[in-house]
Image: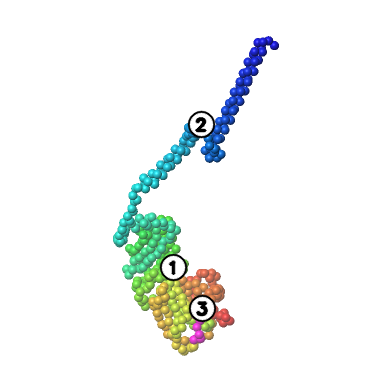
Amino acid sequence: MSKKNQNNMGKTKRSTDDMIDSAIAQQNDWLENRREYTRDFLKSLNLFARPADKKDEVKNLTIEKSETKVFKKSFLRAYWFPVLCLFFVLFVAIWVLFVRGDVPARVIVVPTIPEPVMQPVSKRTIESEIEVAQIDENEFPEFDIVRIENTGAIVVAGRWLPNKNVSVVANGKIVATQQTNYAGEFVYVSANVWGAGNYNVSLLGADSAVKSKDNVFVYIPEKNLENSVSLLMTQDGSTLLQAPRMLADGDLKISKIDYLSNGRIVVTGDGLPRLRVSLELNGKYLGFARVSDYRHFGLGADVEELKSGQEYNLTIRMHDGDGRTVARTNHKFIMPEMTGDDDTFYTVRRGDCLWVIARNFMRRGILFSIIADKNNIKNPDLIFPKQNLQIPLGVMKND
């Protein structure tokens, strides 16, 4: 190998050695720095403390200052935002506790409430309250008053929905239409006189074709209009709206008394429509019946054996809807001798039916078919006024 190459190789070797030495030196410096850092850290924690020389203290103080500066810079760079938030929170807390706390508290003064003063409620206020209230659209028109005046005019008062049209219907025909007020009330007074007779009065909500659930039966006599009758007919019964005031002769009368061989007494007569009549014989109550729309009534009851030639007192009372006696008639008779004939006869009146006739004469209405067969009646539902019926009482002897 030539001298030139040997020189080059020598240079290369020295250069590599220098690099290795430099690396070792750097590593030693790094280790020394680590040792010094560790030593300082432990010293700060007062662990493994030992007295140091003044030179070491000066050196360590210099290193500590330099590291503190580096730590401050790195700490501020990494945690500047949380520190800023912390200062903001502290500022708000101090403002709330000290600055806002100095503001005087508000004092709420409750005014004295005066005594309520009663003031009249205007019609406008009532109307507005009724308009706001919820109204049941399924409500039906209702009667309050049905009265016949002495002049023959009829007065009908009732209630329904506010500001609605209500029609008064008599015997199936509309006779008038009235509008309810803001409170749902209406009053109808007929301009013409209603003639004598019977009327079935109902109400019809004209705006929505709603019919009243209840009807009123009205009876107007030919004379003595103060004895007119109006009767409210409901599902639960009847209520007298206008009772007869002063009955005249003929308003209650007995037309016939039958004492039958089967031990029953049958009284027929006339009274005011749809009122009740009761029967007493010598002070003993026997029963009651209702007067028909055509003023007729018939009442049959079982009695003790009536002796021929003995006097008996028969009392008929007519009662209003409250049970008060509005008319009374007494009939005294002497019991005649029995003829021995088992059958009796009855003249049909308007409003009669075979069921009621059989109940009065034969105790049970279901025996109407016996009367129909005896009189050759093909349709038991069809009988006529003034038709003379034979009542076969012989079939009752075995009962």
Q: Position of residue 136 (x, y in %)?
A: 43, 58
Q: Position of residue 333 (x, y in %)?
A: 44, 85
Cα–Cα span, label 1 and label 3: 29 Å
Cα–Cα span, label 1 and label 2: 128 Å
Residue carrying label 3:
361
Which amino acid does the dot numbered 2 rest on? Lys
Residue carrying label 2:
55
Rendered residue at 35%/74% (across/down): 245
State which tag comes first along the sequence, 1 or 2. 2
* Region rendered in magenta: 301-306
Q: Position of residue 343 (x, y in %)?
A: 53, 80
Marks 1 and 2 in Cβ contact (< 8 Å):
no
Residue carrying label 1:
233
| Res 330 quadrant in image | bottom left
Mark 1 secondary-structure assignment: strand
State which tag comes first along the sequence, 1 or 3. 1
- Position of 346 relative to 307 (above/below): above
Q: Residue furthest bottom?
A: 309
